[in-house]
Image (spheres, rainbow, N blue to C red):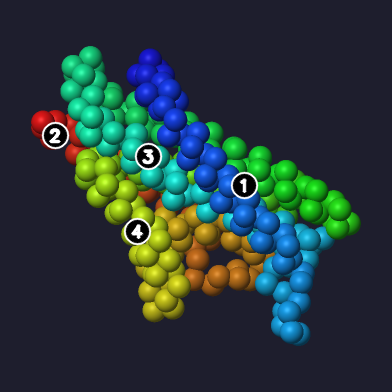
Amino acid sequence: MKLIRAELLKLFTTRLWWIMLIVLLGYLAMVLGVVIAFAGMESGGAAPPFPARDTPEFQRIVWGQATGGGILVAVLGVTMMTTEYRYQTITGTFLVTPRRSRVVAAKLGAGVLVGLVFGLAILLLFALAVVPAVLLSGGELLVTDGGIPRIVSGVLATLVLYTLFGIGVGALVRNQIVAIVAVAVWMFVLEPLVNAVPALQPVGRWTPAGAASALTNPQADLGPVSLDYLLPAWAGAAVLLGYALVFAAVASLTTVRRDIT
């Protein structure tokens, strides 16, 4: 626990975390504004891009958008690991705690807490937008039913996973710029590609993004699944847990066995 507190101290005494949090909340606020503004709005006789604000479908879709913060928490996870190599503070860290596995475990534990903090901040932002939008439109607010608990827990699990993903990539690559580029390419190019191309979707459902979509899929509790290629919600949760364990193993093995200079 002392090591976890030390890792959190390293992060929260810098400006990086709150700058990234502000950027993340600002970006998601714009996403929320677009979704709420165009909800139920028809254009040229075409179906509206989002359900009306007084419908349960609107609430499920909006809450699912909270996973859009995954990229920034992954980058934060990268910096939690690579900054020590960049500024050579890792030498002092391992001199104080020679058992490297304990240092890695502390970084992973701190990553879980950071992912939860960012996830709760994002969910609070969404609550401040969703609750007034639904009530002012005359809709019934869903809290404990309609799949909302599953979606909200899926958002938290996804953000924690991507924080661990970033730590794992940072431990594997160590060069901060290369690691951040690798994370961006994975999340902005590879995952969207395999989940968008029909021929690749049987593979895409097993990616972290596909597993997260299984948890936050707005139709998962309503009979036919709107995205047919996705795993069931429980399987998506199991896949996310598996990835978390894999990233933890990568971070541990690559850090324990490598020279630090």
* Residue matched to label 1: 152
Whether residue 234 is visible here, answered yes or no, is: no
The N terminus lies in which quarter of the figure? top left
Cα separation between marks 3 and 4: 15 Å
**Kind of residue sitting beneath label 4:** Trp
- Residue visible at 72% across and 48% down in the picture: 129
Instruction: Please give the label number shown on residue 257.
Output: 2
Give the Cα separation between the discs numbered 2 and 1. Answer: 38 Å
Q: Name the image quarter holding residue 12.
A: top left
The residue beneath circle 4 is: 186
- Kindly check if marks 3 and 2 are in contact, taking CB atoms under 8 A apart as contact: no
Contact between labelled residues 1 and 2, with CB atoms less than 8 Å apart: no
- Circle 3: element type: helix
Q: Is residue 185 visible?
A: yes
- In the image, residue 170 sits, relative to residue 181, either above or below, namely above
| Front disc: 2 or 4 | 4
> Please, is residue 108 above or below residue 243 in the view?
above
Q: Is disc 1 placed on a helix, strand or loop?
A: helix
